[in-house]
Image: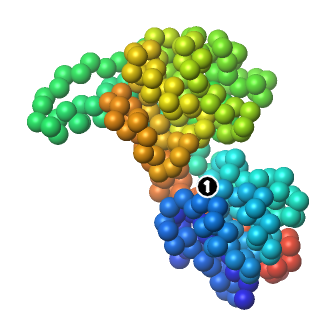
């Protein structure tokens, strides 16, 4: 029996009409038994020899994985980024790859805004002190008084710009692929943005070319007391250099939702200037439902195009 795999840590199979249609067509479905991000060996084992389709999470889909999955025809990424997918290898093995670029945008943008507000108003620090029996009076800052620098003005970056502008903040941005900026957003070079922004937030896909985009040199160019927000990908920030910049007082605070190694267990955990979340950017109920529906629909359409599944419209 042919089957498809859902490798995301969670997925609502029961209420997904496209998944249910595939099951009705005689396909079996296998879920992620570990309920976390899979490593290369685990995804290879899960795909096995009869798997023709994959609804993917953020596990490494390498050339080795594709070479091992002999029957795999379609990969449908439940999310925006494709940096975990070796697209060249997928093409070499005639594997179609899809993603859901729009569905998680509002959720990630809203989390970004939450992280910005948490750092500015020192919400998490205040909470920790209060739970220890203290009554802190920590002075924060207004978002309306800040210049927010957005690196990457795609679906998410533009939503972040809109939300920050609603608070009265000035928004500047760097995006080398954008020819015309949204209303009231000034485009500038990467170096100019580092110099001018009070808050810098990342919204670009990861690639080897921009590994550690924010490193020690970048931090040195920033305003004293600047705030770093990363709800994109962990490899974009040099976490060791970030820790040092925070300890030395160059940066005022940071908030991270993505890390180079996940689950994260590094030194930033003990740094009181950092807000940490466990890669939850898209984990808003409404956004997650839309992502799962779109990912399953992409898988279904991909399998229809390969001739493995009948088109339910016929």
The quarter holding residue 28 reads bottom right
Give left or right: position of 142 versus 279: left
What residue do we see at 66% from left, 14% from top? 191
Residue 1 in the image: x percent, y percent? Answer: 72, 89
The answer to whether residue 163 is seen in the rendering is no
The quarter holding residue 211 reads top right
Residue ID at (67%, 69%): 44
Q: In the orientation shown, which residue stands out farthest toward the left? A: 133
Locate residue 50 relative to residue 257 in the image: left or right: right
Rendering quarter of residue 120: top left
From the viewer's perspective, is 310 left or right of 125?
right
Q: Nearer the viewer, residue 53 or 21?
A: 53
In the rendered view, would you say 287 is above or below 137?
below
The image shows residue 129 at horizontal and vertical percentages of 19, 33
Q: What residue is shown at x 55% (from left), y 70% (from top)?
A: 32
- Image location of residue 231, percent across then percent down: 53, 38
Q: Nearer the viewer, residue 16 or 149?
A: 149
Label 1, on which residue?
A: 58
User: Is residue 24 at all visible to an observer of this figure?
Assistant: yes
């Amino acid at each position: 029996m042919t089957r498809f795999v859902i490798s995301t840590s969670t997925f609502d199979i029961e209420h997904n009409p496209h998944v249910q249609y595939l099951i009705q067509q005689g396909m079996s479905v296998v879920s992620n038994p570990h309920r976390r991000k899979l490593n290369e060996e685990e995804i290879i084992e899960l795909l096995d020899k009869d798997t023709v389709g994959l609804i993917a999470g953020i596990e490494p889909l390498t050339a080795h994985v594709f070479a091992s999955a002999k029957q795999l025809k379609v990969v449908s990424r439940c999310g925006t980024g494709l940096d975990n997918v070796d697209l060249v290898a997928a093409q070499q093995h005639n594997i179609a790859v899809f993603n859901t670029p729009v569905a998680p945008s509002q959720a990630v943008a809203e989390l970004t805004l939450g992280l910005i507000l948490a750092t500015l108003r020192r919400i998490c620090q205040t909470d920790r002190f209060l739970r220890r029996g203290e009554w802190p009076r920590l002075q924060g800052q207004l978002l309306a008084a800040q210049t927010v620098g957005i690196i990457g003005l795609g679906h998410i970056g533009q939503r972040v710009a809109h939300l920050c502008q609603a608070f009265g903040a000035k928004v500047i941005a760097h995006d080398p692929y954008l020819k015309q900026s949204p209303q009231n957003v000034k485009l500038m070079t990467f170096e100019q943005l580092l110099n001018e922004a009070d808050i810098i937030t990342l919204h670009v896909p990861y690639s080897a070319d921009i590994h550690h985009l924010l490193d020690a040199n970048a931090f040195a160019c920033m305003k004293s007391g600047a705030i770093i927000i990363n709800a994109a990908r962990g490899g974009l920030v040099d976490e060791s250099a970030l820790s040092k910049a925070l300890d030395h007082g160059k940066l005022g605070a940071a908030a991270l939702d993505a890390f180079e190694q996940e689950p994260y267990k590094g030194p930033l955990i003990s740094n009181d200037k950092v807000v940490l979340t466990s890669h939850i950017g898209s984990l808003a109920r409404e956004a997650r439902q839309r992502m799962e529906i779109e990912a399953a629909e992409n898988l279904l359409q991909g399998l229809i195009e390969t001739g493995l599944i009948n088109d339910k419209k016929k």
